[in-house]
Amino acid sequence: MIALISDIHASMAALEAVLKDIESVGGVSRIFCLGDVIGYGPQPVECFELTAQVCSRILMGNHEHAVIYGAFGFTPIARQAIDWTRDTVQGYAKTRDGKDLWDLLKRLPVKHEFDDVLLVHGSPRDPVMEYVLESDLWEGSSDPNKIVEIFEGFDRMCFVGHTHRPGVFTEDHCFLPASELVDGFDCSEGKYLVNVGSVGQPRDRDPRSCYTLFSGDAVYFRRVEYDIEKTSSLILENPHLGDRLATRLHKGE
Ligand code: ZN
């Protein structure tokens, strides 16, 4: 069994709760992280170090990209959080203990492949930035070929994060939200793109942490309660992180 975690967004309470849940499930041989370990949240260094310790691979998310190259196209509240995250990570990297952190961040790969499985943060055709959304399936979408091209970009299974909305996209252009797949999803036949959800900032109106288990034949979405108050009060105490980043955690939006 493989565990796929994504979009931790610097929330240690959420990350620790998810790692505890992975431990309790048992039989998980590897954990992959699909990016956005940092950004928005109050504990970027702690989360990055713990993720690096427990994961076989961490991929580059758009928030890691923004910390390194600049927060182009980000909202003002997200940009402010990125600027603080950059200062915090760089400040820590200058100390003796943290000297490899910045280097590690810069060298994160944008994708990882094994067997017929592709892992990216965004999408197969734009691994760091592109969102794959339910609205891409709707009639009258501005890019009608988008979902076709995305499915051409991988062999059998593709796991993504980025939207913070867990569920399964099918080859015949359906989206099955995780909330409707509580007993898991059989993926032994066919081709699927799976959004693994967000550990630290879910946006599907379920504030619990989300991550995904993959057995090779089936996908299981796990929801985990965590101490939201702990992360949200650290955000509220931090003058560089907007209050909205705390209140949204309670609503899962
Ligand atoms: Zn994210």
Image (tube, rainbow, N blue to C red):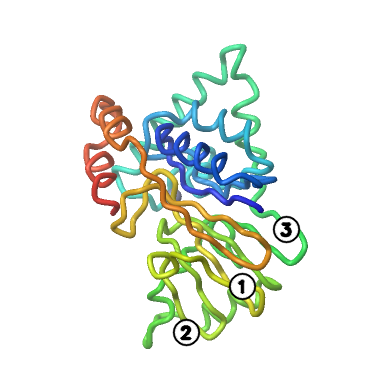
Secondary structure beneath dot 3 equals: strand
Secondary structure beneath dot 1 equals: loop
Q: Position of residue 207 (x, y in %)?
A: 31, 50
Label 2 sits on residue: 144
- Could you tell me how far apart the alpha carbons at marks 3 and 2 are, in whole angstroms? 27 Å
Q: Position of residue 202 (x, y in %)?
A: 36, 52
Label 1 sits on residue: 187
The residue sitting at 66% across, 72% down in the picture is 153
Secondary structure beneath dot 2 equals: loop
Q: Position of residue 140 (x, y in %)?
A: 37, 87
Amino acid identity at mark 2: Pro
Quadrant of residue 159 within the rendered picture = bottom right
Q: Position of residue 9 (x, y in %)?
A: 43, 41
Along the line of sight, the residue nearer the viewer: 220 or 82: 220
Amino acid identity at mark 1: Cys
The residue sitting at 61% across, 76% down in the picture is 151
Quadrant of residue 164 within the rendered picture = bottom left
